[in-house]
Image (cartoon, rainbow, N blue to C red):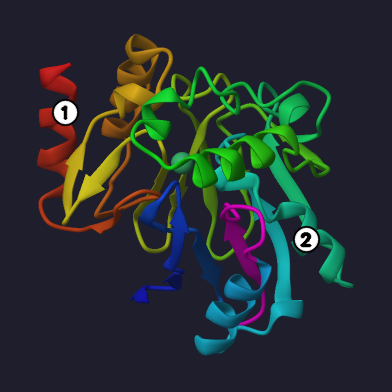
Amino acid sequence: MEILDGVEMLEIQIEAFGGHQELNPTLIWDGTTAVLIDTGTPGQLQQIRKAMNDTGVPFDKLKAIILTHQDIDHIGSLPEILKESDSQIEVYAHEADKPYIEGKLPLSKANLDSMAWQLEGLSENIRQEIVAQVNNSPRGRVDKTLFGGEELPFCGGIQVIFTPGHTPGHISLYLKRSKTLVAGDSMYSVEGVLHGPHSPSTPDMDTAYHSITKYLDFDIENVICYHGGLSKDNVKTQLKNIVEKS
Ligand SMILES: [Zn+2]
């Protein structure tokens, strides 16, 4: 668990696709209100609850969930969290990904063609498990539609940056108080080193690289990638290098 200024970064270890994969939903907490960015894969409610408990954030203080995009490892536990909570939680997502999250359209990458890169070399059992997940995709309601450019009034201010490419409605979030960029899957990181969009899972790489140029307008000191976690060394230079190489 990393703690920045007013930002708890939940690290949830999951076993997915035949191996260990660590996901990094971000929990923001200002002592009164908790906001969760992304929700893990299906079946992770208890892990999320425990991670919140361990860090002293009561589950019933969760007032908002912001989804960076529609992929199954980001929206997976949304239905369970909404069912479990008796408090009013508002769900935020971008207009372009909203119909997928609500189940009006099938998730754009939850099909076996798009997931072929993840399925290579897996046993038949695991493949079947994935097929079952894909055929029974999670869906949840979205209360507030985002377009990009908004500032949400939580925990010192959260700015919404529209960063399509990985999906049509991908957003990133800039946490003003801690100067932290929550990058979703617009980039990934390996041991603190940022990498541009992950090509096997990003259908529109040109748009995805263009989206990263938007980060240069922000004063960013920390980046949290959903896959790879926190980067805080020379982040501005790292971002410039990614943009220049694109
Ligand atoms: Zn992801």
What residue is disc 1 on?
242
Residue positioned most to the front? 124
Q: Secondary structure beneath disc 1?
A: helix
Question: Measuring 75% from the left and 39% from the top, which residue is drawn there?
Answer: 136
Q: Which circle, 1 or 2, is nearer the viewer?
A: 2
Which amino acid, by three-letter code, is at mark 2? Answer: Glu
Question: Measuring 72% from the left and 53% from the top, which residue is drawn there?
Answer: 78
Give the answer, above or below, for where 246 lies relative to 103: above
Q: Residues within 10 Å of mark 1 (few under 14, many from 20)?
A: some
Q: Residues within 10 Å of mark 2 (few under 14, many from 20)?
A: some
> Percent from the top left, x then y, of residue 97?
66, 26
> Percent from the top left, x then y, of residue 198?
31, 29
| Left or right of 113, for residue 48 | right
Q: Are marks 1 and 2 in contact (CB under 8 Å)?
A: no
> Percent from the top left, x then y, of residue 127?
52, 38
What residue is disc 2 on?
80
Looking at the image, can residue 67 be seen? no
Q: Secondary structure beneath disc 2?
A: helix
Depth check, front residue: 152 or 190: 190
Give the answer, above or below, for where 83 lies relative to 219: below
Which amino acid, by three-letter code, is at mark 1? Answer: Ile
| Left or right of 129, for residue 232 | left
Question: Measuring 48% from the left and 21% from the top, which residue is drawn there?
Answer: 164
Q: What distance separates the C-alpha of mark 1 from that of mark 2?
A: 37 Å
Specify the quadrant that holds the N terminus: bottom left
> Percent from the top left, x then y, of residue 194?
19, 42
Magenta stretch, residue numbers: 31-44
Residue 118 forms part of the magenta stretch = no
Specify the quadrant that holds the C terminus: top left
Mark sitting on residue 143: none
Residue 38 forms part of the magenta stretch = yes
